[in-house]
Image (tube, rainbow, N blue to C red):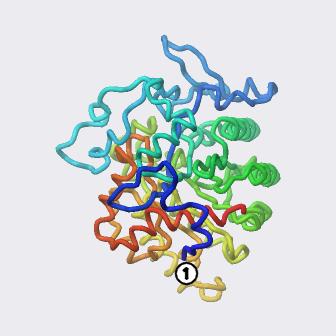
């Protein structure tokens, strides 16, 4: 529960913020994004990784991204120039049968130069003032999609992520002016590397770190993020009270769709069968692994937030966790459903039914994330309020501000 002492770090009447009258306080958005500069992956990449790491090439008159010797294709235009408008795919993701197809719904694209807030932190703060947003967790757009297509070259993956994180600290900061909390990426593919990188993030003032929703890639195959070799990483996150926030991206589960229907897969090109087979699979599996492999029993103060993964998976997972608990008596020290509720926060999609979610987890574990300025989010961050109409004012405040503010205020103090 939020306390006055922790919330004082984020005044609800933040200076310069135009307070939305529907709220009466500055919102705390737990899911904002930037669009990476074209040198975000390469500016700090050591020379010895230039061949196996990311590089830009010209192909058919367009700038394309190579990852080692592979052509990157998950995001159709990774230069982000031009770029679609925020929330333009709102109706598409609402699954309106009378809506336009994805390409049509995107409408006219904008030159990146017309939106300085997508790449400049001071410009972003000015826009946040206008939007009524006091503070935000700031996630990548491109960097959450890289780990999978770069496999099996784990060395190049780690070098690229480290290079990206140094760019992030340089261009955005990990705690800029107490309002913009840039989120560095972590891979567990090398346990020692992961500890080194989280130590660096702590020194930079990070409050939140992120990773891929999915099994860990290793030199000998895949494994669980709850495997014992990662205990030093989880221990350091607990010690610093960091928020570990796995975020949607390329989770590596396209193989499930390809088993049924071999073919391409990307952020904006996926068949109906791929949608059915892969949607909401990796996320519950990831969080099940943390619970079932007893990460929270070993680290009872660890805090994890699921960001931009929606919430429709929560109830089915809790049902499965309880059944497994009942059918393997003596395995857990504590009911796994209680462990989930104690340790995991969730950002629902705007299209999720909040009245259903609060039947599964407490309101204190639900946080607002707009996904702004991405196409699948809302046009303006506080448009998210439309999905909270069933909540009273006190619970709305917890979701829109207090829960994320308290998490952040108590992280890496």
Report whether 331 appears left or right of 16. right
From the viewer's side, name the closer residue of 334 and 227: 334
The residue positioned 21% from the left and 42% from the top of the image is: 99
* Percent position of residue 10, x then y: 56, 60
- Residue furthest to the front in view is 15
- Residue furthest to the left in view is 98
The residue positioned 27% from the left and 31% from the top of the image is: 104
Any part of residue 220 in sight? no
Position of the N terminus, as image quadrant, is bottom right
From the viewer's side, name the closer residue of 351 and 387: 387
Q: Residues within 10 Å of mark 1 (few under 14, many from 20)?
A: few
* Percent position of residue 293, x then y: 66, 71
* Percent position of residue 324, x then y: 54, 79
The residue wearing badge 1 is 338
The residue positioned 33% from the left and 58% from the top of the image is: 21
Q: Is residue 2 above or below residue 156?
A: below
* Percent position of residue 79, x then y: 52, 26
Report whether 190 appears left or right of 278. right
The residue positioned 40% from the left and 37% from the top of the image is: 268
Q: Is residue 207 above or below residue 155?
A: below
Position of the C terminus, as image quadrant, is bottom right
From the viewer's side, name the closer residue of 272 and 342: 342
Any part of residue 365 in sight? yes
Q: Is residue 191 above or below residue 237?
A: above
């Amino acid at each position: 529960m939020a306390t006055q002492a922790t919330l004082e770090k984020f005044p609800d009447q933040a200076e310069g913020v135009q307070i939305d009258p529907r709220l009466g306080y500055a919102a705390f958005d737990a899911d904002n994004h930037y669009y990476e500069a074209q040198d975000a992956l390469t500016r700090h990449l050591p020379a010895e990784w230039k061949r196996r790491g990311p590089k830009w090439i010209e192909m058919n008159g367009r700038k394309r991204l190579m990852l080692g010797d592979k052509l990157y294709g998950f995001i159709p235009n990774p230069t982000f120039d031009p770029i679609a408008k925020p929330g333009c795919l709102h109706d598409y993701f609402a699954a309106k049968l009378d809506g336009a197809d994805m390409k049509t719904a995107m409408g006219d694209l904008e030159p990146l130069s017309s939106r300085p807030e997508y790449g400049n932190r001071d410009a972003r703060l000015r826009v946040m003032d206008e939007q009524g947003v006091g503070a935000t967790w700031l996630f990548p757009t491109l960097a959450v999609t890289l780990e999978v297509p770069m496999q099996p070259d784990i060395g190049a993956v780690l070098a690229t992520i480290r290079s990206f994180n140094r760019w992030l600290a340089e261009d955005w900061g990990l705690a800029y002016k107490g309002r913009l909390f840039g989120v560095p990426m972590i891979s567990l593919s090398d346990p020692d590397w992961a500890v080194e990188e989280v130590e660096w993030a702590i020194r930079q003032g990070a409050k939140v770190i992120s990773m891929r929703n999915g099994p860990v890639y290793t030199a000998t195959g895949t494994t669980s993020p709850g495997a014992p070799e990662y205990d030093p990483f989880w221990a350091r996150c607990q010690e610093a009270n960091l928020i570990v926030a796995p975020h949607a991206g390329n989770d590596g589960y396209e193989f499930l769709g390809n088993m049924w229907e071999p073919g391409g897969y990307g952020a904006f090109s996926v068949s109906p069968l791929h949608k059915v087979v892969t949607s909401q699979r990796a996320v519950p599996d990831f969080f099940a692994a943390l619970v079932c492999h007893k990460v929270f029993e070993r680290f009872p103060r660890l805090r994890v937030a699921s960001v931009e993964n929606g919430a429709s998976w929560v109830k089915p997972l809790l049902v499965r966790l309880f059944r497994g608990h009942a059918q393997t008596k003596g395995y857990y020290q504590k009911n796994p459903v209680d462990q989930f509720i104690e340790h995991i926060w969730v950002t629902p999609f705007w299209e999720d039914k909040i009245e259903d979610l609060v039947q599964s987890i407490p309101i204190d574990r639900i946080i607002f994330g707009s996904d702004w300025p991405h196409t699948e989010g809302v046009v303006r961050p506080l448009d998210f309020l439309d999905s909270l109409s069933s909540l009273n004012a006190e619970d709305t405040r917890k979701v829109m501000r207090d829960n994320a503010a308290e998490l952040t205020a108590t992280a890496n103090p």
